[in-house]
Amino acid sequence: MLEVSFPNIDPIAFEIGPLVIRWYALAYIAGILLGWRYCLHLARRDTVRPNAPDIDDFMVWAIFGIILGGRVGYVVFYNAAYYLEHPLEAIMVWHGGMSFHGGLVGVLLAIAVFSWRRGFSPLAMGDLVAVAAPIGLFFGRLANFVNGELFGRVSDVSWAVVFPYGGDLPRHPSQLYEAVLEGLVLFAVLAVLAHRPRIRRRAGFLTGFFLVGYGLARTFVEFFREPDVQLGFILGPITMGQILSVPMVLLGLYLMVRTRHSANKPTMQAHSAGRN
């Protein structure tokens, strides 16, 4: 069985006195900052809202949505029994444990409330955030690899890696699979779509495409990723990550179909806007 030595990278990037900065934290920061700049670039191309000032103001909402939603999602979906016995540990984010699906719900709620308060379509804001989201996913998955966590199942492929916390057998580097599919590939496709004015006018289409794209990519990679030890498989060979991806794909398909129907009724939309 072939194997690749794990690149033993210290998960701590640097220390300043008692302050410890980890690569995982830097990945979050890089994803948020680069995503913010990309959203600003996209928002400045059109005259409709949300505009650049809206994006600036939304950043705080997005950060809270990611962190709170990600933590609550992990507690509820992946380790509820443990945190029911140790409720105070649920707020100890620094001990690790974040759920993408929970973070997604948190950001969606933030988008809905923020857009309602500002008086523009949450789907329009969702489209900007969706196009930038793969940037954060890419850096986050690289950080998972550096930490040697969320590794794949035992494999004999030539690029299999022996992870420090995964026993003596080589495994799929599933974090890198996710970085490529959920990060690079999804970002590239969304970037192409976002540069087409006809697509941008279909508010909600890019959001729907992101949901479908991520859901399918995550479902595929889960067949190579080791299930969470405290959960294992949920239904036969099905994992929690795959179960949580199903409603994402369904919602995404609904949004994409909905925008297609809306795009076929420009006259009705125009008259409706005039009456309001």
Image: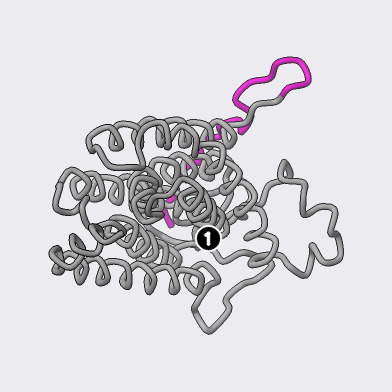
Q: Is residue 30 above or below residue 150?
A: above
Q: Provide the residue designation for mark 1.
A: 101
Horizontally, residue 12 falls left or right of residue 258, namely right
**Image quarter of residue 215:** bottom left
Q: Residue 194 at x, y = what percent? A: 22, 46
Q: Is residue 151 visible?
A: no
Decide which of 157, 91 is in the foreground and name it.
91
Lateral position of residue 84 relative to residue 43, left or right: right
The quarter of the picture where the C terminus appears is bottom left
The answer to which quarter of the image holds residue 40 is top left
Residue 17 location in percent, x, y? 76, 15
Which residue type carries mark 1? His
- Residue at 33%, 62% in the rendered image: 208
Q: Judge by depth and name the residue closer to the eye, 76 or 165.
A: 76
Foreground pick, 61 / 11? 61
Question: What range is drawn magenta here?
Answer: 1-19
* Residues packed near mark 1 inside 10 Å, few (<14), some (14 to 19) or many (20 plus): many
Q: Outermost residue, front direction?
A: 275
- Which quadrant is the N terminus positioned in? bottom left
Q: Is residue 46 left or right of residue 91?
A: left
Q: Whole-percent x and y of residue 5?
A: 49, 41
Residue 63 appears anywhere in the view: yes
Q: Mark 1: which secondary structure?
A: helix
Relative image position of residue 137 (x, y in whole percent):
44, 46
Please tell me how many numbered marks the rendered image carries. Answer: 1
Query: Depth check: 30 or 106 in front?
Result: 106
Q: Residue furthest bottom?
A: 236
Q: How is the image coloured?
A: one colour
The residue at 70%/61% (across/down) is 75
Whether residue 14 appears in magenta in the rendering, the answer is: yes
- The residue depicted at 26 percent of the width and 49 percent of the height is 190
**Identity of the residue drawn at 18% across and 43% down:** 195
